[in-house]
Image (spheres, coloured by chain):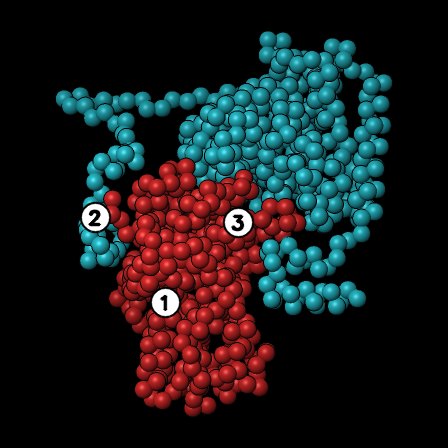
Amino acid sequence: MATAGISTAEKTEKLTLAQAVNHGLAQEMERDPSVLVMGEDVGMDGGVFRVTEGLLDKFGPDRVMDTPLAESAIVGAAVGLAIAGFRPVCEIQFTGFVYPALNQLFAHAARYRNRSRGRYPLPMVIRMPYGGGIHPPEHHSESYEALFAHTPGLKVVIPSTPGDAKGLIVSAIRDDDPVIFMEPKRIYRAFREEVSPEDYTVPIGQARIAADGKDVAIIAYGAMVRAALEARETLARRNVSAEVVDLRTINPMDIETILRSAEKTGRVVVVHEAPRNAGVGAEIAALIQERAMLSLLAPVQRVCGFDAVFPFPRLEEHYLPAKERVLEAVQKTLDF
Amino acid sequence: MRVGRLCRYPVKRARGNLVQPEAVIKARGSPKSDLAFETGDKMPVTIIHEARTERLEILDRSGKADEALLPKLSSEEMASLYKLMVRMRRFDEKALALQRQGRMGTWGSVRGQEACQAGLAVNLLKEDWLAPSFREHGVMISHGIPMRQIYALWRGDERGHLFPEGVNCLPVSIPVASQLLHAAGLGLGLKLRGEKSAVAIGFAGDGASSEGDFHEALNFGGVFKSRTLFFIQNNQWAISVPFHKQTAARSIAQRAPAYGMPGMQVDGNDVLAVYAATKKALDHVRAGNGPYLLECLTYRMENHTTADDASRYRLAEELAYWKERDPIDRMRAFLVSRKLWDDKKGQALLEEVSAEVEAEVKAFEAEPAAPATDIVDFMYKERPWFLEEQRALLAREAR
């Protein structure tokens, strides 16, 4: 069956982000028989976003498990499977549905290594599509990365490109600690990029300079990297040179890259679609003022979602940060 | 381009509108329905499920046995059940005494539940996994965990959780019912590994049976036929809330058929009955038939923990009623009636377990506190930069 999933190619292919995650999963399952995929609709259906497409046919129902519709069970059973020697990759269908699993994530997955004094590390990945922009019903657009980043013991990874998505999912699977892997569903199929069929990793904890610049640093991740890059183009026409930092890992954050960009440009704008209060932007701003105060030419600006419930689709474009709001924030740093 | 096949969300695909071929769906195992649609004027009303739930009791409260139900155990094996229970009680009493002297943290006593845990313990194989809640000290010390580690744990030292290599026991899980999912997943893992004997035991109580995770665990275990024994000690009190306020149902065991597994209730203060029921349940799970739900009906003789005062919510006469049904007294009466036990043996046993307990207390109390850097050292395989910084603070303060 000619599916979009499962890499058979020997040479570089143009893939979407969703396909790149699929290729990473397939490659790791091929390489390591202890890797399992489990979740709602991940088998027969290949996932509602088709990220696990083709895996059931290739690896069988013992390794690609359609689970009962129960998020706590998916994560809780994965804890047990990890202790039994497997590397489960769980899919939570949407970030908005992760709440029932939070007890398992916060009270157990994040703590097991510590609680057992290192005896039971949990090599498990929790994948979940996150963020707005696809006009769905309620609970399908949330961005909860700050919840996970605030929880000691978890790692939080968010790719923004197909190439990174593959390299990061591979790293997440090989990581011996639980990794929350949030996939920006808005750009699952927004663009394609050459992705190597080789076995490669993108290290967790390393940000990427998505575009070089010297006047202002725009720090973003996930779908917001696109907004940042669009803003950069406009700024270039105004003779403002913006650097775009793609964070890639929310926890542990790449402090070195953040500080280097802050020191180099003196102006920082953080962009995320999650609410602002106690969010990732606040942490970045705090780190910069603690460690690079004297390099700053302006206060760090935050461009975020609103501190409000994510709206139904007819208003969602008003909610999501876009280029204009980024430009406005950059201007504030220039005018300061 | 929208996907042609049934899909809940608009999903763009670049290559073709693939409709799932029927053959592919069938090859993956198409869903089957057992609905038989009849035609005619009389549509059937069919009984689709009937169930009954049994309770097993072997010893009466005076220790007299129903001979027909007695499990086939040698005299030594019967005596060893009793010994295990006495060891558990001595261990538990010592912890309560230490707590009153300020030498122990909050302690959840296992008093009254010894028969449940001893009856299970003797049926366990070394390769079996325990997924305990916080009142499983009895079975834990019987499965190979040194007493000193459990004392250390409840004195407030995480190192108590570093159980000896080869002793298959998960760390204590405090959020009730949550560990049942670990037992379900572990039981599935054992099945996927092709294990033929090892099983996972998930522990919970009556209070936990109200949690969502209780349902999710039994349901998950049932669907995947995991190698899991769900071992429920219904001690009838969840802190101050009695069993009848947890559920309108008569038992927990009766839920088993709803999850597609067998189950039964057993007199949890009758160690011979627990032994027999546990053996039957474990045989079922070991044989690869999927999980089993075993409910031991017992009674929490102590406060919920040392931080609780049960006299605020339960009557002295209820306690007296259950004291008459004490699992240890009952088994001793049985053994004495068969001339398998006497006061001399009793005295010798008490001296033996007391000496063990005292030695274990000495050992755990001799252990200095862990370095403060332990706070951050077990969070990740490799310490991220911020924990490196925070560790430096702890190290500096320690100097």
Which chain does tag 1 point to? A
Quadrant assignment for the N terminus of chain A: top left
Q: Pointer 3: what residue?
A: A123
Q: Is residue B163 left or right of residue A211?
A: right
Work out whether A301 lies above or below B293.
Answer: below
- Against B137, residue B330 (above or below) is above
Circle 3 — which element?
Answer: loop
How far apart are the alpha carbons under marks 2 and 1? 28 Å
Instruction: Check disc 1 and report the residue beneath it.
Output: A223
Residue drawn 28% across the image and 30% down it: B32
* Marks 2 and 3, how far apart at CA: 35 Å
Q: Residues within 10 Å of mark 1 (few under 14, many from 20)?
A: many
Q: Amino acid at mark 1?
A: Ala
Do marks 2 and 3 share a subunit?
Answer: no
Q: Which hue belongs to chain A?
A: red
Residue B100 numbered tag = none
| Same chain letter for marks 2 and 1 | no
Residue A89 shown left or right of residue B21 in the figure? right
Q: Which residue is mark 2?
A: B18
Dot 1 and dot 3 residues touching (CB under 8 Å): no
User: Residue B312 is drawn in which quadrant?
Assistant: top right
Query: For mark 2, does the 10 Å Cα neighbourhood hold few (<14), some (14 to 19), or many (20 or more) residues?
Result: some
Above/below status of B355 relative to A172: above
Query: Camera-side residue: A190 or B112?
Result: A190
Q: Nearer the viewer, residue B340 or B66?
A: B340
In the rendered image, the residue lying farthest to the front is A10
Colour of chain B in the image: cyan
Residue B291 lies, with reference to residue B131, above or below; the image says: above
Residue for point 55% across, 30% down: B199
Q: Please, what secondary structure does the residue beneath circle 1 have?
A: loop
